[in-house]
Image (cartoon, coloured by chain):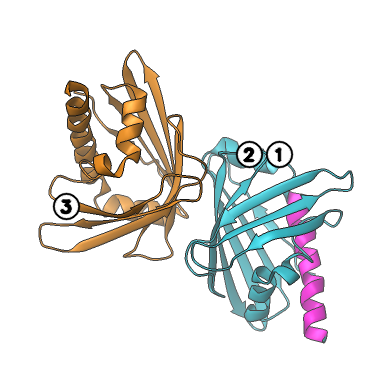
Chain colours: A orange, B cyan
Amino acid sequence: MSKTKITAEPGIPQIVITRDFDAPRDLVFRAYTDPQLLVQWLGPRDISMTIDRYDVRDGGRWRYIHTDPQGNEHSFHGIFHGTPSPEAIVQTFEYEGVPGHVMLDTTTLEEHGGQTLVRTVSSFQSVADRDGMVAAGMERGVVEGNERLDEVLAKLQAS
Amino acid sequence: MSKTKITAEPGIPQIVITRDFDAPRDLVFRAYTDPQLLVQWLGPRDISMTIDRYDVRDGGRWRYIHTDPQGNEHSFHGIFHGTPSPEAIVQTFEYEGVPGHVMLDTTTLEEHGGQTLVRTVSSFQSVADRDGMVAAGMERGVVEGNERLDEVLAKLQAS
């Protein structure tokens, strides 16, 4: 089983996440951009996800709500920059609980021998913002989300 | 005369620009957000600037074209994130000559004793992108632009 690697170097306002998936790149891209697939894997296992909008184009906006087991809602939104493609997806990301704090995410997908390496670089406005995101427990959501994505990709390839 | 300070630390994918202006914060904010004023100061002295759109609101887009003395056109666009206010302006920034490379700019304005300190943190996708922006000669544009902004602010306060 492939493992998610999360790097947050001291003093550098970025997080780098890499993960291999046992699926061709086009399928991984589909799972990242089709709202009906995204809703099945993005985030930790114990949340439910509702997508408000997901407009996959240059300048298109997205917004979704995560509801935790206690019923608390956490909403996120962002805007695609450039046309998302299997090579790269560039988007901003904001948690509505802390307005004014914006991330810029660059996700690249690279196919090698039937597997796809997904690499996301998140650029923050400050190291404090980056550290806040790590402290908020993003790791569990990312790791579990990627395991759920493994399952979605396996199901798509079996069908 | 106040001087523009530009900081680009090795290994950190950011540029920090600070500059004091001899004007109240609301006026500086106006000069940053009113297209009719912006066009009078943004960029080096030898370019002419045309604003295609400038929609100052959360999610609003802007686009402008700089024409250099040789007639070459350089176009830029971006999107405001959050409602721009005299406290802060957050926006993305793309040079259309190198698509796929996006910056995230956070500008804060702070008034102290009749002067306004403007601080802009530009976050890049990579140190290489940051170094590319420095190598492209952004310094002259920023320094001369700020001198032109001094002149615009003086004129506004004299009238």
> Badge 1: how crowded within 10 Å, few (<14), some, or many (20+)?
few
Residue in the picture at 80% in, 66% down: B148
- Badge 3: chain ID: A
> Magenta part mainly helix, strand or loop?
helix
Instruction: Say which amino acid is labelled 3.
Output: Ser
Labels 3, 2: one chain: no
Task: Look at mark 3 in the image and give the residue it sits on.
Answer: A48
Disc 1/disc 3 C-alpha distance (Å): 46 Å
Residue in the picture at 68% in, 65% down: B19
Position of the C terminus of chain A, as image quadrant, is: top left
| Residue A18 is at least partly visible in this image | no
Q: Position of residue A90 (x, y in %)?
A: 46, 42
* Residue A68 figure quarter: bottom left
Instruction: Say which amino acid is labelled 2.
Output: Asp
Task: Look at mark 2 in the image and give the residue it sits on.
Answer: B131
Q: Which numbered circle lies on residue B135?
A: 1
Establish if A150 lies above or below A144. above
- Number of numbered tags placed on the structure image: 3
